[in-house]
Image (tube, rainbow, N blue to C red):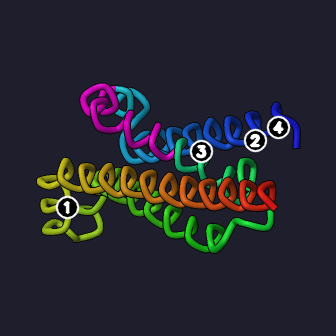
Amino acid sequence: MTLSKRILWPLGAGLAGSGLLALLYFGLVSWVENPQHALDLFWEDRWIVVPIILGFGVQAALYIILKKRLFVPVTHTGPSGALTGAGGGMSTVAMVACCAHHVTDVLPILGLTAAATFLAEYRIAFMLVGLGTTILGIIYMLVILMKERRQALQFTAAVEAV
């Protein structure tokens, strides 16, 4: 695979992941309230929403690197394909934790006032947990990538020594 594809695939996946998560965030808040409220809420919570959105993009890029074996020889990827699914799961949890509090605006209509109050009161905590899972997912995939890369380099050095 050419170097440009090695860079373009993860870059595209990262931008797509971040873009889709941002679209989901703004779409959900706009649907529940209105687009101006979505912008206001984003600006108020930008210190945590931006890292979650960017973190999801980084996870998407790392997943593509591992899935397409862009920097690791095909014969030495180990279980990285299955293990990166766990990182994707963490991204999903982060997304749900980030946006779950926006449903509080419609829950009272559905007769779920206690749930609405709980989610509204702890929305920052949910977003912090979401950010934490995003960071853990990134670390997890980086550890897999570095481990597999190190094993591939050791294998190459052993082959060259023979």
SS at badge 4: helix
Crowd class of label 3 (few under 14; some 14 to 19; many from 20; radius 10 Å): many
Q: Tell me which numbered mark, 3 or 4, is placed earlier along the sequence.
A: 4
Identity of the amino acid at label 2? Trp
SS at badge 1: helix
Q: Look at mark 1 in the image and give the residue it sits on.
A: 116
Foreground tag (2 vs 1): 2
The answer to if 89 sits in the magenta stretch is: no
Q: Tell me which numbered mark, 1 or 3, is placed earlier along the sequence.
A: 3
Residue 75, given in percent of the width and then of the height, sits at 79, 67
Q: Tell me which numbered mark, 2 or 1, is placed earlier along the sequence.
A: 2
Q: Look at mark 3 in the image and give the residue it sits on.
A: 17
Mark 2 in CB contact with mark 4 (< 8 angstroms): yes
SS at badge 3: helix
Residues under labels 2 and 4: Cα distance?
Answer: 6 Å
Span of residues in magenta = 40-56
- The label number, if any, that marks residue 5 in the structure image: 4
- The label number, if any, that marks residue 95 in the structure image: none
Which is more toward the observer, 159 or 19? 159
Foreground tag (3 vs 4): 4
Residue 72, given in percent of the width and then of the height, sits at 72, 54
Q: Tell me which numbered mark, 1 or 4, is placed earlier along the sequence.
A: 4
Foreground tag (1 vs 3): 3
Identity of the amino acid at label 4? Lys
Q: Residue furthest right?
A: 1
60 lies left or right of 91: right
Q: Main secondary structure of the magenta part?
A: helix
